[in-house]
Amino acid sequence: MLTEDSPDVSLIPIGAAGGQSETIYLASTTDFFSPISLDPYNQGRIACANTLSDLYAIGAHRVDTMLMILSVSTKMEEEHRDIVTRKMIEGFNDACKEAGTKVSGGQTVFNPWPILGGCASTTLIEHEIIRADGLQSGDVLVLTKPLGSQIAANLALWLGDEEKWRKASAVIDLDTALQAVQKAEKGMMRLNRNAAKLMCRFGANGATDITGFGLLGHAKNLAAVQKAEVSIEIRKMPIIRGLLALESCVDANYQLSKGFSAETSGGLLVALPSLPSAQDFVAALQSPEFDGPEAEAWIVGEVVAGDRTARLAENCQVMEV
């Protein structure tokens, strides 16, 4: 949660290195949640990626250590519980390896629901930190993952629920539904690590990760902490194909088209100093050196003079991807 003097993570000054004047900071973040994927291995990777994203939002692409927070289900049959728990841990550890870190400890408890997450930490010096409050009028906003993960996760459940699938199938066919679930899971499992590296390379003025408050909700939080008198205008919303039609026709109104649908392990919303730098950022992220061509990213808005608020533009383009 962004505050007036803090970004998405806890930043604690711990002194200066010998012979250096810059302050060293301990950056840490904690997150955990119940399953959003029906595949326990994927759930492990998503839980790790989601935990790390707050660090990535300040440009901290090197993570020193991860503590795992694990809740073992008391409601599952022992044989199933052991398989699910083992696969979640495997996925979490594999994502840690991809992130260049490892699990060095943690805590395990018993609970009716299986829960997984962690506490990630690293150290940085002042000039390595991309603070959230530096946006400038004219900055161009890039989003590094598509929207719709909450509805996609529920859609995976609706496919096995006759009554809810009957409602959903009135607006989405089976192939499109399966593709939407698969695309959402791939996105949630993808680390924002390379986006964090490129934020540093291209001089980002600030960023936040898109999770429980949705795109506009997090944009509002980001706008509220700015030093400059600016606002955020969202002009484009890339939504996973087929999900927009489901935002209110099954069991709730998810407000996806309004920018408030929750995301899990969502993309970074990055403020870059110019249109060319934003275009170069997107091109670099999609290059083989980084995430590759499957890693979609979009220019979605602009920072404008204003009163530290955020809004959808009147002609905001909602696009299926």
Image (cartoon, rainbow, N blue to C red):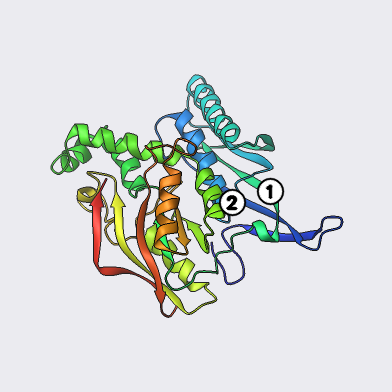
Q: Secondary structure at mark 2?
A: helix
Q: Is residue 320 left or right of residue 66?
A: left
Dividing the picture into quadrants, the one containing residue 237 is bottom left
Mark 2–mark 1 CB contact (< 8 Å): yes
Please give the name of the residue rendered at 24% of the width and 52% of the height, measured from the top-left corner.
319
Element at label 1:
strand
User: Residue 6's x, y, as percent?
Assistant: 61, 66
Classify mark 1: residues with Cα within 10 Å, few (<14), some (14-19) or many (20+): some
Question: Which mark, by number, is residue 122?
Answer: 1
Q: Quick check: can you spot residue 284?
A: yes
Total labels drawn: 2
Which image quadrant for residue 127?
bottom right
x and y percentages locating residue 226 in the rendered image: 52, 73
Left or right: where does residue 181 sit relative to residue 134?
Answer: left
Res 55 label: 2
Instruction: Name the quadrant containing residue 142.
Output: bottom left
Which amino acid, mark 2? Leu
Give percent across and percent down for residue 50. 51, 45
**Viewer-nearest residue: 224 or 317:** 317
Give the residue at the far top of this rendering.
Answer: 79
Dot 2 alpha-carbon crowd within 10 angstroms: few under 14, some 14 to 19, many 20 or more: many
Say which label, 2 or 1, has the lower sequence index: 2
The amino acid type found where label 1 is placed reads Thr
Q: Which of 61/250 is in front? A: 61
* Quadrant of the rendering where the C terminus is positioned: top left
Q: Which mark is residue 186?
A: none
Q: How far apart are the two marked residues, 2 and 1, measured between alpha carbons?
A: 8 Å
When the figure is inspected, residue 36 is found, relative to residue 301, above or below; the finding is above
- Residue shown at 40% from the left, 50% from the top: 263
Residue 272 % position (x, y): 47, 61
Q: Toward the viewer: 135 or 176?
A: 135
Q: Residue at x 45, y 32 (%)?
A: 42
